[in-house]
Amino acid sequence: MANSTTVQILEDGAARTVVKFEGVLDTSDVSSMTVVDPSVQASVDPTGSNYLKATKYRIDKIIHNIEDGLSVNLFWDAATPVRVEELTGRGKGDYRDFGGLQNNATSPSGKITATTQGWSTGAILSFSVILYLTKQY
């Protein structure tokens, strides 16, 4: 077989995006996958005359379920990507109390990408991550 990864947009409103991404790895780690790209999401003001598009996201909450031995790394995409979080095991991170995780990359593309670490020959490892994002422009 080959690795299988999917991205599902659960909500794409004027101010918020909720995205679920998951994978089953049976041949290698994921070297890089785009989780979400603001340029292809709904406008910030779809009913207004200016149709603003978000240029980046703030991460407000993360829920993850990652098989033991595997880790998922989230990055702010840029010429030099900046790691946001390394996720392992099962858990929830709620960052709203301090304004969320802000994109601090230099010249960011706005995308959030992910990689994995921990796959080994003969293993079949899986992960599932849900991101609650606020659109920024």
Image (cartoon, rainbow, N blue to C red):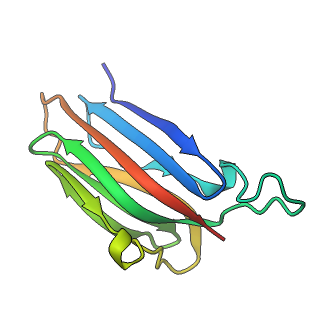
Q: Is residue 7 above or below residue 134?
A: above
Q: Nearer the viewer, residue 96 or 109?
A: 96
Seen in the image, is 95 located left or right of residue 120?
Answer: right
Q: Nearer the viewer, residue 15 or 37?
A: 15
Seen in the image, is 125 located left or right of residue 79?
Answer: left
Seen in the image, is 31 located left or right of residue 47?
Answer: left
Q: Is residue 128 above or below residue 45?
A: above
Q: Position of residue 24 (x, y in %)?
A: 28, 30
Where, quadrant-wise, is the N terminus in this rendering? top left
Q: Position of residue 28 (x, y in %)?
A: 26, 37
Residue projecting furthest to the right: 49
Residue 110: image quadrant is bottom right
Where, quadrant-wise, is the C terminus in this rendering? bottom right
How many labels sit on residues? Answer: 0
Q: Residue at x 48, y 35 (%)?
A: 8
Q: Residue at x 82, y 59 (%)?
A: 51
Residue projecting furthest to the top: 1
Q: Residue at x 42, y 76 (%)?
A: 99
Q: Nearer the viewer, residue 119 or 57?
A: 57
Q: Is residue 15 above or below residue 41?
A: below
Q: Position of residue 105 (x, y in %)?
A: 48, 77
Q: Residue at x 33, y 29 (%)?
A: 3
Q: Nearer the viewer, residue 117 or 13?
A: 13
